[in-house]
Amino acid sequence: MAAAAAVAVATGADWTVVRRRGGRRRGDVPVTTSHLDAPPPLPLTPIPWAPSDPSLDPARVSRLLDRALAAISRVEASRLYRRLLLPDSPLCRRLASLAPARLSLLGVGSFESSPAARLQLALAALLRRDLLPGASATADLFDPVLSSVECAVAVALGFAVPNLDDGCGRRVEEPTLFYMPHCEASLYDALLVANWEPRAQLRRVCVLGNSFRRYAVQAEENRSGPAAKANLVLKAGRFAWEQRIDEAGDVDDEDWFARAFNETSWHFFEVDQDVDQRTEISSQALSFEKLSL
């Protein structure tokens, strides 16, 4: 029934076919080393987007929906999820203080072809259910590599799929949890750029994604690499509260769980109201320019 509804929603949308950008799969690459290839340039302004594959096979939608629901059951029963939202933990207290009204899953990749991406989608679905229980809460999902079938399944699971690609440069109007699994450093930077001013704006943002601490290490190891160019990620890492999702060994000892959730951290931005971020980031950018000379 859900699959049929998803097909109806997807086929009713006014989508046009555009070329897939670079075949990039954001959600399927663990961050254990720096990416050697520079990512494609991000759009400066949102650009129209539609799935590159216009075909919508109801049987394929139904199969993928079943696989997604199985992944949700698997993650829900895992040691990782049982420990994730323990009552009275520092993480839960920060989530309660944030009180997210929206969840955005960005850069998940092709969850039809990648078991790791399906586990990431499953975690997002569970977080949506358990952290955003209110009727007014919303959730969306985006990756430029998504197919029409994947969009239909996302809708069936309760996620809206936008028809614009904003390159993660998304300014929030309400407290928002961004789950950005294994994205490039430039995408986290684009999100921070969009929410850097005024100073209190970052308090509305929580990022579940690659460890900013790890990016700082990578920047030290490679001054010309992608991490070193993500100026705001490095700056935000200095005042963010970060906790790794597997800090207590909570990632189950299975290959796909390790691929899906390794090097993944929660980030809350504890902004000092008296700090002029524009001045500090300008100074930091200048220091990196000197290092590269």
Image (cartoon, grey):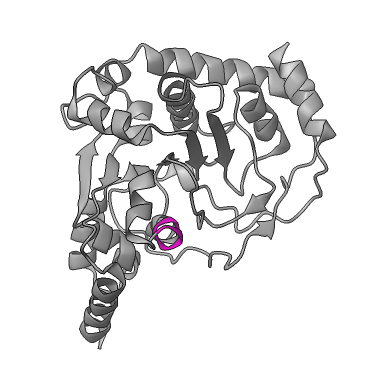
Indicate left or right for 54 with 230 as reference. right
Q: Where residue 176 sits in the image (x, y, percent)?
A: 44, 40
Q: Where residue 287 sits in the image (x, y, percent)?
A: 21, 80
- Residue 153's image quarter? top right
- Residue 193's image quarter? bottom left
Specify the farthest residue to the left.
248
Q: Residue at x 24, y 58 (%)?
A: 273
- Residue 194 within the magenta-colored segment of the rendering: yes
Q: Where residue 171 sits in the image (x, y, percent)?
A: 49, 54
Specify the farthest residue to the front.
274
Indicate left or right for 230 with 150 as reference. left
132 and 287: which one is in front?
A: 132
Q: Establish if 24 lies above or below 235.
A: above
Q: Establish if 35 lies above or below 32.
A: below
Q: Where residue 55 sits in the image (x, y, percent)?
A: 80, 36
Q: Which residues are magenta?
A: 191-195
Q: Residue at x 27, y 76 (%)?
A: 279
The answer to whether residue 57 is seen in the rendering is no
151 and 36: which one is in front?
A: 151
